[in-house]
Amino acid sequence: MEMSVPQVLELVPKRAAVRSVLKEKGNLRPPIVWAVGGGKGGVGKSFVVSNLGIFLGKQGHRTLLVDADFGGSNLHTFLGMSAPTRGLHDFFAKRSRNIGELVVPTEISGVSLLGGAQYYLEAANPKFAQKERLQQILTRADTDYVLLDLGAGTAFYILDLFLFAQEKIVVVSPEPTSVENVYQFLKSAFFRWVKREISSPQIKQWVDRAIDQRADNGIKTPVDLIQRISEMDPQLTEEVENLRRSFRVKLVVNQVRTSKDSRLLDAIVQACDKHLGLTVEPLGCVPFDDTVWKSIRSRKPFVQHYSHSASARRLEILLKKLVLPEKGKHGVA
């Protein structure tokens, strides 16, 4: 039986009590990290992150939203806030080594924001050590969930943050450029993972050439890569096959206007399986909604102020699909 938002809110005191007991026993689990990417700007990644975060907060989960769109930070806008005066730009510029002091509260109880790096140009391409340290800090964050709002494109730091998350979500809009970019994003993420996990110099070279779309070595997809490896080393083939089987991503189609748009969800899932050999799970569609731009223009968090809209109800369904499996994994009440 589905629960309404008011029914869910009745569970908050119980959840708060459970968390305090866990803290006293010293066995509070690390935060669950979700990353939302997609390759193209303007598809609604920040919209999805902000509103999933708000729903998590309303359900009593402490949630940290991280604006990891370095150079194009705007997550605060979807939360009805002005741009934070401090954020990841201070961390990357080494003006603050304590990320905790850079986190700001939002108007939603339990939801906080780590702003982006919009004032620090070098943050558009953070160094490897900076990215690694950021991931380590987020892993130790005293919160239940960390939601990463990733930037557009396939830069290594974006792919690494995407791969870092336990729950990997891609957002696509019903536009040819968005669909094309999401295929490229998924291929690049998988190739990046293989390059990090497999030590063979030959395979690393093949992966580099596969990522470089101008190169023509017959390797354009994960299936091509595995076929080439099978001709060289059966043992390495099995290792890469294991990576392929464990590479699981969830897909959201945003701004759906027509029945044809909604069919795009299953079409992308099937194409990824057939042509890329990658498992993509259909998470759901979010309909186009005029109240979305109204909420942004009026600086009112969408699901906070338009909770009865079709898009808000669909986002709530997506959240339940994400949270319920996690309850089983972690034994959350």
Image (cartoon, helix red, strand yellow):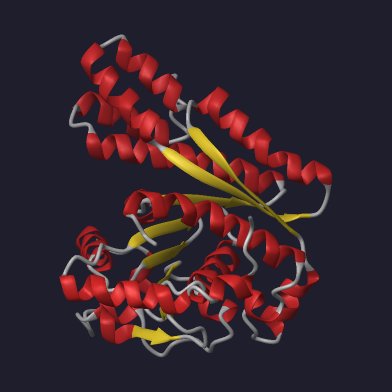
Q: Residue at x 44, y 39 (%)?
A: 248
Quarter of the picture containing the N terminus is bottom right
Percent of width and height locating residue 72: 50, 71
Q: Is residue 140 left or right of residue 288?
A: left
Q: In the picture, residue 18 is in which quadrant?
A: bottom left
Percent of width and height locating residue 157: 34, 56
- Give whichever of 333, 81 is nearer the camera: 333
Image vertical order of residue 331 relative to residue 27, above or below: above
Total residue callouts = 0
Image vertical order of residue 313 relative to residue 192, above or below: below
Q: In the picture, residue 206 is in which quadrant?
A: top left
- Give whichever of 281, 96 is nearer the camera: 281
Percent of width and height locating residue 155: 40, 52
Quarter of the picture containing the C terminus is bottom left
Q: Residue furthest top?
A: 231
Q: Residue at x 73, y 75 (%)?
A: 293
Q: Is residue 123 left or right of residue 80?
A: left
Q: Residue at x 62, y 63 (%)?
A: 3
Q: Is residue 39 visible to us here? A: no
Image vertical order of residue 113 relative to residue 135, above or below: below
Q: Is residue 98 visible to us here? A: yes
- Give whichever of 158, 44 is nearer the camera: 44
Image vertical order of residue 275 relative to residue 192, above or below: above
Percent of width and height locating residue 68: 41, 67
